[in-house]
Image: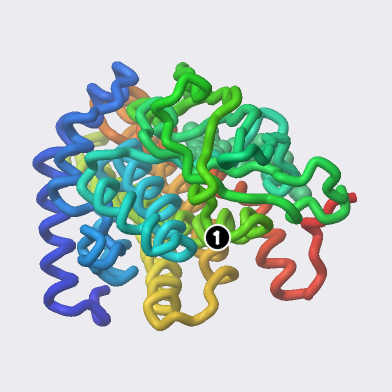
Amino acid sequence: MDFELTDEQRLVRETARAFTDNEIVERARENDRNEHFDLELVAKLAAQGYLGAIVPQEYGGAGLDYLTYGLIVEQLGRGDSAMRTVVSVQTSLVCSAILRWGTEEQKQRYLPKLCSGKWLACFALTEPDTGSDAANQRTRATKTESGWVINGAKMFISMGNHAKLALVFAQTDRDRDPAHPHRGLACFLVETDQPGYQPQEIHHKLGLRGSDTAAISLDDVEAGEDSILGEIGDGFKVAMSSLESGRYSVASGCVGICQGCLDASISYSKDRQQFGRPIAAFQLVQEMIADMALETDAARMLVWRTAYLKDHRKPNSTETSVAKLFATEAAVRCANLAIQVHGGSGYVDDYPVERYLRDARVTTLYEGTSQIQKLIIGRALTGVNALVPA
Ligand SMILES: Cc1cc2nc3c(=O)[nH]c(=O)nc-3n(C[C@H](O)[C@H](O)[C@H](O)COP(=O)(O)OP(=O)(O)OC[C@H]3O[C@@H](n4cnc5c(N)ncnc54)[C@H](O)[C@@H]3O)c2cc1C
């Protein structure tokens, strides 16, 4: 259903569709098999302008609205979630934070490099002992004469091995009150070409194998006084604003997974013959296809509602969580159904559906698990915050 799309949005979507079909789909299986982070393909994403879609043109971006950005991300998600993750991290988690919180100097220094793909960046919030309870950062930043020194460890950081810039969240207040963990939190723009920044590749993931994931140790990492995004104490707000954009991006990618599952299942069910008929002729197979169509449409509509709110600068955290929760869980359900439609063939990687399932699985975990999205929605509806420290 395209009733809200402009001609330009349709054109951008068609271009992204063709790019995905011609450049991404072909390589996705090999990159998944080889756990290969495809920097050549990342460069192509950058050349298409997909790393800075929502960044204004004056900073090297494409200056697109959120709906158009989501249309691109949906297509990339249909092709390969590993490449979609690159776009979500670079554009939503990093560029959007610099745009919203950065000084003019920080924007000029970093955004053109990030939009052009000259630099990759990562968003380093999660720690070995700090996941859902993101405010409870163990990483510490200590004031020095010339700036800050950061010590700690980060876990599961996408693109952490290749990033030239890391958004590092750290606690600046040694005596912070445990009842108010957000206080003293800060987000630092850390340039990674220094010996104290030590990333290590994480292998053997269930899915997203073509994506780069790192454990990072931070050992006396230096950050200048001008490297803080926002003010000391804004760290949690910076993280949440990034995640509001990131969750939208993840949800858009999951609409792509749903659509990919549907397309693959329709095509397979018309080819595959059993009992002398294409399996598409069986009502129970049609039911699975209809269920996938329902999930896909519903997920897309929730994502588009969020895009509308973002583009009209209306509050949208709850709606973003609704879209993220529904679209990510829908992608898992669709991928499961798609494997069922493909029978045994769906269990091997001749078809994309088993990869869809493995890749979709992480989307209900990262950028806030499904449980955390429910608590955000519950908090908005009841006015009671379950996400406070005991
Ligand atoms: C491939 C991959 C890429 C990632 N990329 C990044 C990245 O780029 N940057 C980054 O910072 N992080 C990244 N992450 C980390 C991800 O965001 C975290 O894994 C996620 O936030 C969950 O944290 P956790 O793993 O510590 O789980 P935990 O927080 O320990 O949660 C474990 C379980 O407990 C549940 N739970 C926790 N608290 C509550 C509660 N209050 N109520 C109900 N249930 C609760 C959770 O929902 C979950 O089911 C990535 C993770 C993966 C796997």
Residue 280 vs residue 214, the one in the foreground:
214
| Residue shown at 20% from the left, 47% from the top | 116
| Residue shown at 40% from the left, 83% from the top | 312
Quarter containing ligand 1? top right
Q: Secondary structure at mark 1?
A: loop
Residue 223 vs residue 197, the one in the foreground:
223
* Quadrant of the image occupied by residue 366: top right
Residue 292 visible in the displayed image: no
Where does residue 349 sit, x and y in percent of width and height?
29, 24
- When the figure is inspected, residue 11 is found, relative to residue 388, above or below; the finding is below
Where does residue 350 sit, x and y in percent of width and height?
24, 25
Where does residue 52 sit, x and y in percent of width and height?
27, 55
* Quadrant of the image occupied by residue 151: top right
Amino acid type assigned to the residue bearing label 1 in the image: Gly
Where does residue 251 sit, x and y in percent of width and height?
43, 56
Q: How many marks?
A: 1
| Residue shown at 48% from the left, 56% from the top | 247
- When the figure is inspected, residue 180 is found, relative to residue 318, above or below; the finding is above
| Residue shown at 49% from the left, 81% from the top | 314
For label 1, the crowd category at 10 Å Cα-Cα, with few meaning under 14, some 14 to 19 and many 20 or more, is many
Q: Disc 1 designates what residue?
A: 230
Question: Is 135 on the left-hand or right-hand side of 260?
Answer: right
Residue 100 vs residue 316, the one in the foreground:
100
